[in-house]
Amino acid sequence: MLRLQRKRWKFRAFRKRRELSVVQNRTTTIKPGDILLFCTFRNEDIRLPYFFEYYRNLGVDHFLMVDNGSSDGGSAFAAEQPDVSLWSTQAGYGNSRFGMDWLTYLQLRYAHGHWALTVDVDEFFVYPFCDTRPLAALGDWLDASDVRSFGTMMLDMYPKGPVSQAVYERGMDPLQIADWFDTGNYTISRNKRMRNLWIQGGPRARAFFADNPEKAPALNKVPFVKWSRRYTYVSSTHMILPRGLNLVYDQQGGEKTSGVLLHAKFLNTFGDRAKEEASRGEHYGGAGEYQRYADMPEQEADLWSKWSAQYLNWRQLEGLGLMSKGNWA
């Protein structure tokens, strides 16, 4: 059944290619061994400069981006970047499996044999030794270890004080103003069918889903994969097929090397964005999550608590048990 589902998602993605229009295609510059990044965005001009800077510094060689109807100039900025290939679409985000159909097609066509990183514009990949070793080093070590996928926990970042007062300017590192996170308050369950861990909790669970924590957003992701044409994501990057790729945490009580996605959603731009996305209704569950965000008055959106910790580096996160270097020395 899972094989049939995987074929169906791939066929669906192949059909959805008709929704994509080429803005700038530089994929002929992709070389064997290049690290590729895949991303869908909409009206993210304010975030794109630092996003590109962060991932270039990390070692991404080429960005394959899909602009879903931006009106803020972000598409033009992305198209100007020499290491970006850009497609655009006006089609519905929800009807594309929240952008995954478009990215699945691009991965099918361009990512085979490459280490591929799939993230959102507000997500920042952190892995062991990321301050001294580029993504290519991580990929080489995973290749040598015969590991094809790398798991992360998504860690929601927020300011100390009201979110509306964390004023973000274009090109700024968002983690300069949203540099706090929950050290605990996380739950883990197992999805036996897909073999992945399901992680929930953090500030969104306690602030927006306190009445129904089992409906809080999933925090488990598999964003870094040695891609093959046989693969496809199932639900965003939370799950992937074949399901063996979801075994990114050791199942026998030990530790596999893992990382974190620092999720810098909660800035002063958050309130207006939440209202817009709640109105559009293009996200999962009819954008019910965004409706909860939009319903909270801006002056009450203060996620800091006495259990919050200020972010320092990846070693701090490892010490807290939120990621692990495993046996990568």
Image: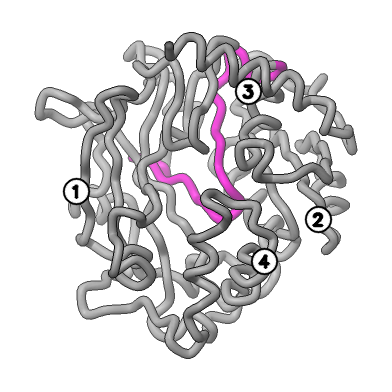
Is residue 291 part of the magenta span, yes or no? Answer: no
At label 4, the amino acid type is Ser
At label 3, the amino acid type is Asp
Gap between marks 4 and 3, in whole Å? 39 Å
- The answer to whether residue 39 is above or below residue 195 is below
Point out the frontmost of discs 1 and 4.
Answer: 4
Q: Earlier in the sequence, mark 1 or mark 4?
A: 4
- The answer to whether residue 88 is above or below residue 33 is below
Q: Which residue is mark 4?
A: 279
Is residue 122 part of the magenta span, yes or no? Answer: yes
Give, as a single range, the part of the protein colored magenta. 109-131
Residue at coordinates 43% horizontally, 87% vertically from top-left?
300
Q: Which residue is mark 2?
A: 70
User: Are the residues flagged by discs 2 and 1 in contact, CB closer than 8 Å?
Assistant: no
Assign a secondary structure to mark 4: helix
Across and down, in percent, residue 166 comes to 53, 80
Observer-nearest of 53 and 203: 203
Across and down, in percent, residue 329 comes to 25, 30
Mark carried by residue 145: none
Across and down, in percent, residue 191 comes to 27, 31
Question: Callout 4: few (<14), some (14-19), or many (20+) C-alpha neighbours within 10 Å?
Answer: some
Assign a secondary structure to mark 1: loop
